[in-house]
Image (cartoon, rainbow, N blue to C red):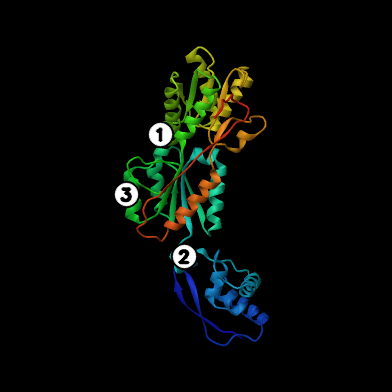
C-alpha cells in the first residue's frame, strides 16, 4: 500500500508528503490514490498524477503549461495518469506557485461587445495561445471607465487591455499598482503609453478622397458618440481631407454607433439639407447598415446610383450579400496578435519604454458607393 501523509494546508490547498515506497504496479497506485482521495474528500492534485506517472511534480506542471519543454514519453505518461485520475489542473494552485493568475482584463464599452464580436473572439484566441484567459469588463459609455477600473482592481489579473478613453489619472493608477496595460485602438495626446492603434484619421482621409475622386461634392457624415475618441478621429480625417480638396464641410449628424441611429440619422440629414446628399460617410458599419436599409427599403433611394454610403470597421455583416457594404476594414487579427505579444512581453518586465504600433485600414470597395481611383 502507498501511504500519503497530508499535513500542510495553504489557502485551502493540500500539499502531500510521501511516507512509504510506491506500489509495485501502476494499477495499484491508481486504486490506492483514488481510495485515499475519496477518504480525504479532496480533489486530485498534480502530486497524485506525478506518483502514478512516476515523474516529478514539476514535470506534471510542465505538461500542462503551453510551450513548456517536456519529452514525448513523459507527456504521454502524465496524460495517461491524468486521464485515469480525472485530473484537472487547479489554476488557483498554479498561481500560488508562479505568482501569476494567467488572467488578462479586457476593458471595453458595451457597443464594442455588441458590434465587434470578431475582435473579442480574436483577442481571446491570441491570449489562449499564450496560456492566458480573458476577463471581460464592459461599460455603457467610454467615460465610465473609472468605475470599471475599480472593479478590475478587485481581481488578480496579470495585465489589462483597455479599449476605452483613459486620462492621465488612470495611467498613474496603473503605474502605482505596477500593473501593465496596453491601450487598444485609442490614443493619449500628452502621455506615452503602450498602444496598438489603427490609423483612423488616415483611413477616413482616404475614404473621403476616393469619394471625391468619383465626383461626389455634397457630403454628410453620421458621427459616433462625442465621448468616443475613435469617432472624433474619423470625423477629423473626413473634414480635413474635404477642406484640402476645396469642398464644403460635411453636414454632421451625431449617431450612437448602432443600427437605429444610422436609420434615424438619414432622415435627419435629408430634413436638414432639403435634398439627398451625394455621399454619406458613416462612423461605423452598424450605422451604415441602418442608413442603407432605410435608404433602400423605406425611402426608395438608389444606392449607389443616387447616394453613396460607406462604413468603417469591416464587421462580418457588412460583407453579407444583402449589404456588400463599401467600408474600411481594420486588420483585427494582426492588431489582436500584436496586443497579445505586447502585453505578454510587458508582464514581468521592468523599465521598458512605451511602444506604439500603428496599423492601416484597407478599403473594401463593396457595392454601396462609387469610388474614384486611389
**Position of 265 relative to 181 (above/below):** above
C-alpha distance separating marks 2 and 3: 26 Å
Query: Residue 182 location in percent, x, y?
Result: 43, 49
Please report whichever mark, 2 or 1, sits nearer to the chain's N-terminal start: 2
Could you tell me which quadrant the C terminus lies in?
top right
Question: Considering the numbered disc 3 on the image, is that residue within a helix, a strand or a loop?
Answer: helix
Residue 172 circle label: 3
Q: Which quarter of the figure has residue 184?
A: top left
For mark 2, what is the residue?
A: 95
- Indicate the position of residue 97 as horizontal and vertical percent values: 45, 69
**Which of pointers 2 and 1 indicates the residue nearer the eye?**
1
Name, please, the residue furthest toward the top.
274
Disc 1, SS:
loop
**Residue 15: percent from left, percent from top:** 49, 75
The residues bearing labels 1 and 3 have C-alpha atoms spaced at a distance of 21 Å
Q: In the rendered image of this protein, does residue 340 appear above or below residue 295?
A: below
According to the picture, the residue beneath numbered tag 1 turns out to be 227
Amino acid at each position: 500500500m502507498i501511504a500519503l501523509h497530508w499535513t500542510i494546508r495553504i489557502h485551502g490547498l493540500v500539499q502531500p508528503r510521501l511516507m512509504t515506497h510506491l506500489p509495485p504496479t501502476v494499477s495499484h497506485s491508481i486504486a490506492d490514490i483514488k481510495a485515499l482521495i475519496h477518504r480525504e474528500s479532496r480533489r486530485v492534485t498534480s502530486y497524485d498524477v506525478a506518483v502514478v506517472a512516476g515523474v516529478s511534480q514539476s514535470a506534471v506542471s510542465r505538461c500542462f503549461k503551453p510551450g513548456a519543454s517536456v519529452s514525448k514519453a513523459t507527456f504521454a505518461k502524465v496524460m495517461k495518469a491524468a486521464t485515469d485520475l480525472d485530473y484537472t489542473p487547479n489554476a488557483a494552485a498554479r498561481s500560488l506557485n508562479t505568482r501569476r493568475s494567467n488572467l488578462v482584463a479586457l476593458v471595453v464599452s458595451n457597443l464594442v461587445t455588441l458590434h465587434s464580436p470578431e475582435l473579442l473572439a480574436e483577442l481571446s484566441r491570441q491570449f489562449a495561445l499564450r496560456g492566458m484567459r480573458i476577463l471581460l469588463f464592459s461599460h455603457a459609455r467610454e467615460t465610465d471607465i473609472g468605475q470599471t477600473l475599480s472593479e478590475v482592481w478587485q481581481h488578480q489579473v496579470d495585465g489589462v487591455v483597455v479599449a476605452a478613453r483613459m486620462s492621465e489619472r488612470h495611467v498613474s493608477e496603473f503605474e502605482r499598482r505596477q500593473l501593465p496595460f496596453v491601450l487598444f485602438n485609442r490614443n493619449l495626446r500628452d502621455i506615452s503609453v503602450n498602444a496598438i492603434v489603427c490609423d483612423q484619421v488616415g483611413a477616413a482621409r482616404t475614404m473621403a478622397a476616393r469619394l471625391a475622386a468619383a465626383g461626389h461634392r455634397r457630403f454628410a457624415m453620421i458621427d459616433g458618440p462625442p465621448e468616443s475618441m475613435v469617432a472624433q478621429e474619423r470625423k477629423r480625417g473626413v473634414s480635413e481631407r474635404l477642406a484640402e480638396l476645396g469642398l464644403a464641410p460635411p453636414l454632421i449628424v451625431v449617431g450612437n454607433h448602432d443600427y437605429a441611429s444610422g436609420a434615424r440619422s438619414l432622415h435627419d440629414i435629408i430634413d436638414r439639407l432639403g435634398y439627398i446628399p451625394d455621399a454619406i460617410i458613416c462612423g461605423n458599419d452598424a450605422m451604415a447598415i441602418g442608413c442603407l436599409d432605410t435608404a433602400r427599403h423605406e425611402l426608395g433611394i438608389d444606392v449607389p446610383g443616387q447616394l453613396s454610403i460607406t462604413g468603417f470597421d469591416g464587421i462580418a455583416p457588412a460583407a453579407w450579400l444583402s449589404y456588400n457594404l463599401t467600408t474600411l476594414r481594420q486588420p483585427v487579427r494582426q492588431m489582436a496578435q500584436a496586443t497579445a505579444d505586447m502585453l505578454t512581453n510587458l508582464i514581468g518586465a521592468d523599465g521598458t519604454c512605451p511602444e506604439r504600433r500603428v496599423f492601416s485600414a484597407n478599403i473594401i470597395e463593396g457595392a454601396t458607393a462609387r469610388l474614384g481611383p486611389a
